[in-house]
Image: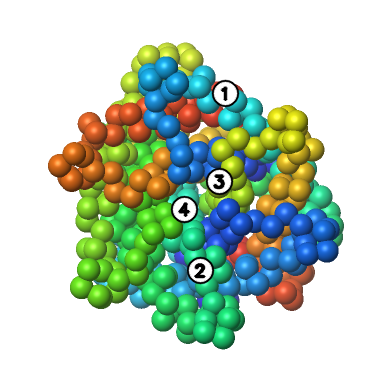
Amino acid sequence: MTFPILNNAAVCGCLGGMASGRQPIIDNANELMQPADFAPQVTTAVTYAGEEVIAIAETFLALGSTPAYLSDLESAPGVTQVASGGPATNVIANGFQSIPAALMILGMASFDNQPNPSDANGQITAAFFAAQANAVSSIFGNMVFNNTPDNAPPPTLFCTD
Amino acid sequence: MSTITYFSLYNCALAGAAAGMLSQRQALYENGGSAVEPADSNVLCATSALYAKEVDALLVSASPAPPASVLDMVFDGSTVIPTTAALASASAYLPVVMALMSKSIFENRGIPTDAEGEVYDQAEWTASLIPNAIVSYFLAFSNNTYADGGDVVKFVPLANVAMGAAMAGMISGRQDLYDGNGNPLAQTSFATQVATAAAFAAEIDAQLVAQQIALGGGFPTHVADMVGAPDWSTVPPTTNFLTNALYTYTPAMGCLCKAIFDGRGIPKDANGVAYVQADYADMANTVVAQFLQYAINGVVVT
């Protein structure tokens, strides 16, 4: 399970957090922003997201299992399930509406007030994001894991339907 | 039998509240120096769940009832599979907007506690009027979204999430819980925010359409595929690519739009008048530029 949609959610949450409250609308040359102006931020976010997906897998490994609510978002490793038609179910539809948004918003909060995260040497590495990714995946795991019938108590948090 | 009605809205209210409570204050380690574990967030998640439960109850009891886009998300105790354009669009933007608005109202509040320093119980959440403020705001938004398949905006889920996210950003860390007359907030309290956010969303859409023309084949394929000919209806997510795109690009546009409004409140011109569409050209340009860089280089659509 490689969670492509969770990877994408982590990237966008990181981007949103880094931009929060300080986003310039012109570049250093006093011109309108272009997509390439954001290449460094996207590179940073992709690096974080790779670590976040690993942290999520490790979190669920430590918890004992990955709930179907999450794992069914893939039809095969690296392939996103369909949300409409085919094998789609109500629970899968709910999962697509809830899970990427949840990971996005938690990641966004984690990066609020961190416009340019880097290590002490100014480097942006996966290892640098390990603790941050773990913190996000821990809360994410708390919300998502408890909904499986086999794992009560503690009480359900997310509703699968 | 679940006591919750609007499942994905509840889930996203929960996640958004927790995100707002820990915004800028996320602990990465326990007090003992070890990495945090899921159980360390039990209090945060449990109180966020009570907030979300109150949000769900207020949506259920809302009078007048929520618009069809909200009502149609669930049927007979289950989330509805998005088989139509309208359902597909709503399923993508409504939960994201709920998450973003919920995050915003908790920014700078942390985890709310009562006079004894304990987290709110259900009754205290009701009395707090925080859920009321968000439900009023959310209904003000959802009652004024752009229709799918119309000719006003083209990228409907992206435009609608832009509108809701802009509204979320306007209240980031600063939302009062009463109106100017000391009454609990109602949908009508937010007419200015709705109107100016709709203008921003229209400008986002216009710039996306302009970029699609300018970039030609360089425009992200899966963004283009979210809406279809001949009437720009949202395409139901019947393939893995369409599913990934709908539930990836919509939250991305949402968080970028919220971010650019954070700290700006309601943008106003030199005469103190809330921005109209033309005033949003520069802000929308930045969001669209960032979004396209993300869509072209930052995602895995498989």
Q: Is residue B166 visible?
A: no
Is A133 on the left or on the right of B14, as rendered?
A: right
Q: Which mark is residue B52?
A: 2
Q: CA distance from mark 2 to mark 4?
A: 13 Å
| Discs 1 and 3 share one subunit | yes
> What chain does badge 1 belong to?
A
Which mark is nearer the camera, 1 or 4? Answer: 1
Which residue position is annotated with label 3?
Answer: A113
- Marks 1 and 3, how far apart at CA: 19 Å
Q: Are marks 4 and 3 on the same chain?
A: no
Instruction: Give the number of the mark in front: 2 or 3.
Output: 3
* Mark 1 surroundings: few (<14), some (14-19) or many (≥20) residues within 10 A: some
Quick check: can you spot residue B141?
Answer: yes
Q: Is mark 1 in CB contact (under 8 Å) with mark 3?
A: no
Name the residue at the left extreme: B271
The amino acid at mark 1 is Ala
Label 2 close to label 4 by CB (< 8 Å): no
Residue highlighted by disc 1: A39
